[in-house]
Amino acid sequence: MVAVVDAWITPFGKRRESIFDLAKESSLPLVRKYRDVVDFVVVSNSYSGEFNGVSGLNNLISTYLSLEHVPSVRIDNTSGSGGSAVLVGKSLLESGTARAVLVIGVEKMSTMRTREVTSVISSLLPPRERSVGISVPSLASIMTKEYMARYNARREAIAEVAVKNHRNGAKNPFAHIRKEVSLSEVLSSPVVADPLTQYEFCPISDGSASLLLVRDEDALSFTGRPVYIKGIAMGSDSSHITDREDLLEMRSVRRAGELAMRTSKVDRVDFAELHDMATILEIVEAEALGLLKRGEGWRSYLEGETEIHGEMPINTSGGLNSKGHPIGASGIAQLVEAFHQIRGEAGERQVKDARTGLTLSMAGFGNSATVAIVGDEP
Amino acid sequence: MVAVVDAWITPFGKRRESIFDLAKESSLPLVRKYRDVVDFVVVSNSYSGEFNGVSGLNNLISTYLSLEHVPSVRIDNTSGSGGSAVLVGKSLLESGTARAVLVIGVEKMSTMRTREVTSVISSLLPPRERSVGISVPSLASIMTKEYMARYNARREAIAEVAVKNHRNGAKNPFAHIRKEVSLSEVLSSPVVADPLTQYEFCPISDGSASLLLVRDEDALSFTGRPVYIKGIAMGSDSSHITDREDLLEMRSVRRAGELAMRTSKVDRVDFAELHDMATILEIVEAEALGLLKRGEGWRSYLEGETEIHGEMPINTSGGLNSKGHPIGASGIAQLVEAFHQIRGEAGERQVKDARTGLTLSMAGFGNSATVAIVGDEP
Ligand SMILES: [Ca+2]
């Protein structure tokens, strides 16, 4: 397997810098240290064409990093690009194709207005569903209503996801929204997709995050404290939401989680970074992964169990909800948070005795999911 | 290493089908046979957002193939996406991440007019060079003039690349332009980038090509005649053309070729599929790869050496020049041709005793290049 031996991230938010400068900002600190050993660059990005009028992004970035002699590719899997890029990086290393892979996640979205961004992202939906008005927020609405009805879940519990994630994000110097919000603020803010309100969806952000990946056996020659990827797996599901028997099931997430746990021989983790594009998703994902009990996950939010000092801390970084969701960067940023947690470098957000963690990078509304289990041992 | 155990291709050209239907047309024949074993789908595509208003292409295609449970990613490296996708596929297999990888290359370009397509593709150039009017055709013009001046090469020799490739394409039922052209027709057609004329550039095409890749040791359980990838390597160079000391050097191509030859322990091949986006490129690439003698390559075209029955057959498929260049499909289509040649299934285009071949999939104007060496033995 492989290890993360260094990691860096830019502040997320509405940034003035170009997509190239954002990518450099997160990767140059790594390149300065490891220029001579990086022998593959994997760029995680989905929409440079649509948002920035740029193609061949991987080659342009490596040229700007003066790594023009180093092979590179761009990996796209929409919101789940980061997890896919790490899975490809791991495969390049384990197959002997590369020895040190620089993974750069980047997206620059604020070039467009919210309405245009939503339209671009809707291009991931099957034309048949797009044409009848299904959108990602409308799916979150349906999921919320179904979850509340089936499990008698309280509306406040779902809103608490946003309260907790904003509280965490306020402690994260790289988060987009660094401000706490109260439960009543969340509940009374404008409704985006009934019953979910504005604070319950991630903002539109620019940002970049980078990792240096090497094989386990090489890790200690880079740092005394590598963070090992103990298992990583991808699950998949139909892009036709109408084909799914149960919207709450999240088959891709469950399957990726089971495979990653099995490979890593880990049966519980000390913290998790999940794909909380909407509040409801964090709860349903945590249940699909077995982090919270099925149908009971919402109760954990009322009881503080998912807080930084709770029994199962989720999204200590602030999550997509508060940290922001620059599409191609998000999955990489989750691993940056895990890297800091496991090394005990998470400052105010530090989880006590964090030795193993889980990250979930997800595409679309769960048509693809990559779960990584990380830890302080191989 | 890995092997191609099955391959399929659509006719290239201006197609009425959607990008999804094109992808299905090339991949469904493979999926029908191997549905139960395919455990990863790699989609090679660069511009589905720009040309088709589609994102998350890999998940949509796998859903339409009823492979919704199979993990997938999209690999982009502009014109060189195909080679990159095969390199990623090989890494997924060799690392044990997958056992049978379906690689689908697809691009649907005819949704736009030529001028718009050119503008989209120019988005791969560094902004600094794009802003001073550099374009891919203008680079081909500079390269042609430099080559002719340095080596006293005859203009006719360069045009002969198009004559030969159209002759081959006329024999290929999947080629976009199935019509022979004479030397005088090539020379007298409208100039696109002085001195190169219209027939010397690839047309704008739609199309798709698919491969099934497995590990060497599994290959014989799929087919009695696998085509083995004996070596595959990627080379890279600056995206700033103005940073290259010598435009004729094609460092990425040379480096990828050297590495692939070394891995495969092959010192000569029986045929090659090169990236002839413009006629001059085929000659300069063949020299960089050592297939033709440096500075003398042009003479081979006057003497018929690169014809199907010559000493070093190049682009028996018709090449990008006549077969067409649907960006994400091109690198995969080259391997489809190699698959047919080595299995003796190339019909009128069959090279005698074709046991080893080389394919070159290239991005931009050589900022990335992937060379594969294939053969009838591991
Ligand atoms: Ca999928």
Image (tube, coloured by chain):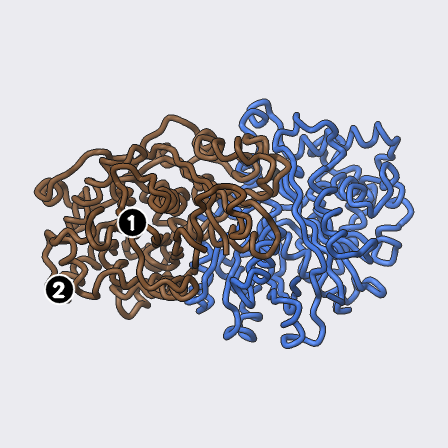
Chain colours: A blue, B brown
Dot 1 alpha-carbon crowd within 10 angstroms: few under 14, some 14 to 19, many 20 or more: few
Q: Amino acid at mark 1?
A: Asp
Report the residue marked by disc 1.
B353
Q: Earlier in the sequence, mark 1 or mark 2?
A: 2
Residue lying at the far front in this picture: please name it: B224
Front residue (pair B164, B236) = B164
Quadrant position of ligand 1:
top right
Q: Residue at x 65, y 29 (%)?
A: A241
Q: Amino acid at mark 2?
A: Ala
Dot 2 alpha-carbon crowd within 10 angstroms: few under 14, some 14 to 19, many 20 or more: few
Q: Is residue A315 shown left or right of residue B255?
A: right
Q: Is residue B196 visible?
A: yes
Q: Quadrant of the C terminus of chain B?
A: bottom left
Q: Chain of mark 1?
A: B
x and y percentages locating residue B295 in the rendered image: 18, 65
Residue lying at the far right in this picture: please name it: A303
In three-dimensional space, the C-alpha distance between marks 1 and 2, rounded to whole angstroms, equals: 37 Å
Q: Is residue A103 shown left or right of residue B149?
A: right
Residue lying at the far top in this picture: please name it: A132
Q: Residue at x 69, y 70 (%)?
A: A226
In the picture shown, does residue A300 fall above or below B229? above
Front residue (pair B352, A115) = B352
x and y percentages locating residue B227 in the rendered image: 43, 48
Q: Chain of mark 2?
A: B
In the picture shown, does residue B181 fall above or below A213? above
In the picture shown, does residue B363 fall above or below A289? below
Disc number placed over residue B149 in the picture, else none: 2
